Amino acid sequence: MHFLRYQLPALIAMVASVTKAHIIMESPVPYGADHLDSNPLLADGSDFPCKQRDNVYKLIKQNVMPIGQNQTLSFIGQATHGGGSCQVSLTTDKKPTKDSVWKVIHSVEGGCPSPHPGNLGDDPFGHGTDKFQFAIPQQVPTGDYTLAWTWFNKIGNREMYMNCAPVTVTDSSQKHKRRVHRHGAAILDKRQSESLIQERADALSSLPNMFIANIGNGCNTAPSGTTLAIPQQNLGTSVDHHAPDELVPPIGNCGGGQAAPAGAARPQQSASLAPPAPSVQPQIPASPPAQAPAASASPSVQPQAPASPPVSAPAPPAQAPAPPAPAPSGMNTGTCTTPGKSVCAPDGMGIGTCDEKGQVIFAPAPMGTKCDKTLGVLVHSKRQVFKA
């Protein structure tokens, strides 16, 4: 409320002065909100990260975020360019540089910041964009961070938008309530606190790196009118599908072999569980080439040529049963109620994303982790529970 009372007039004046207004992050309150313009990052990446400028890390408000509690991502402005895909990421650096490592905590594929087919309007300080919910996962240790909102627009120039905000992550766990000594001094059980922090620090590295494109790094989003399919290695397990868009992978050298030609696409149902599929698909085309030599060898012997085709012909039907092979790859399936939300396997040893048909495919949890059914995130499997 103090921010709205004292900073919003300056913010409105700033946004109104922008010739070609887009949108900026309203919540969490960004660094330097009183002089933050709404333009995308420069095409050469010279102002990455956080739109480098004078006083780029000017503190307006420290955003406090308890672990596991819903936080709101909202915006100012109405030039939403048909939506697109967004991410929320964290870095431990309070003043990020080009060398900072960003870890993704939430992704939105399609309809971000609005599923509206064009722009919502031309009011640079208007509202109307959707609001999105995200939470700090259990993997994140308590402390101070810089949060980034990044956006790849659907319509218009191929751009990357980025706003940054200061956040303090706090522990909301009931296991760590303060206890009062007989002399009235409030203390926190040090043994419990240090154990939990260490577990989260170990698991933090398991979060994916932020997706970066359109800033001269050799990776670009597909042409205007397409919605970005965030590469699997950057997607994470907390994913929302906010519009029924067809998702198109990026183009170029995007890391991890995830880039694809502009014509390639994936349906929005393929969320964070697609990685196991490629491991099976390369095996499907592998056997047809094995039969090709048998067919080519037969023409060399004229009398046997008629006999050879019948031998190779039955082979393709044998390939048909191969596609159901994903089941033996260690994944189970189940039902769910909220499309786009992360779901834990009943035994906690797998995690998946609910699709539009109310179905989920559970990918095995990485070694040393398990799925927290309450939060729908991966946590360290060796966590110790200390009783007060």
Image (cartoon, rainbow, N blue to C red):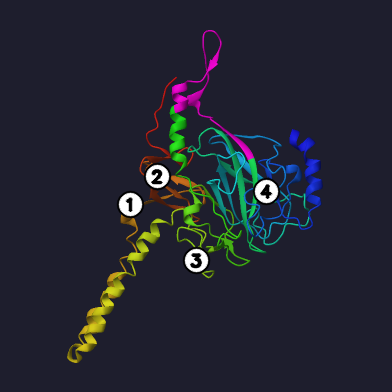
- The image position of residue 276, as x and y in percent, is 39, 56
Give the residue type that dot 4 points to: Gln
- Disc 3 is placed on an element classified as loop
169 is higher (above) or lower (below) than 352: above
Contact (Cβ within 8 Å) of mark 1 with mark 4:
no
Residue 242 in the image: above or below residue 259: above
Q: CA distance from mark 4 to mark 3?
A: 31 Å
Check disc 4 and report the residue beneath it.
52
Judged from the image, the secondary structure of the residue bearing numbered disc 2 is: loop
Tell me, for residue 345, which label it has, or none. 2
- Give the crowd class for mark 3: few <14, some 14-19, many >=20 residues within 10 Å: some
* Residue 143 horizontal/vertical position (percent): 56, 32
Inspect the magenta stretch and tell me whether residue 176 lies in it: yes
Nearer-N-terminus badge (3/1): 3
Number of the front mark, 3 or 2: 3
Circle 1 residue? 330
In this orientation, which residue lies closer to the viewer: 26 or 82? 26
Q: Amino acid at mark 1?
A: Gly
Between label 3 and label 1, give the one nearer the viewer. 3
Q: Vertical placement of 206 versus 281: above or below?
A: above
Most distant residue in the left direction: 303
**Can you identify the residue that label 3 sits on?**
260
Near mark 1 (Cα within 10 A), the count class, few <14, some 14-19 or many ≥20, is few
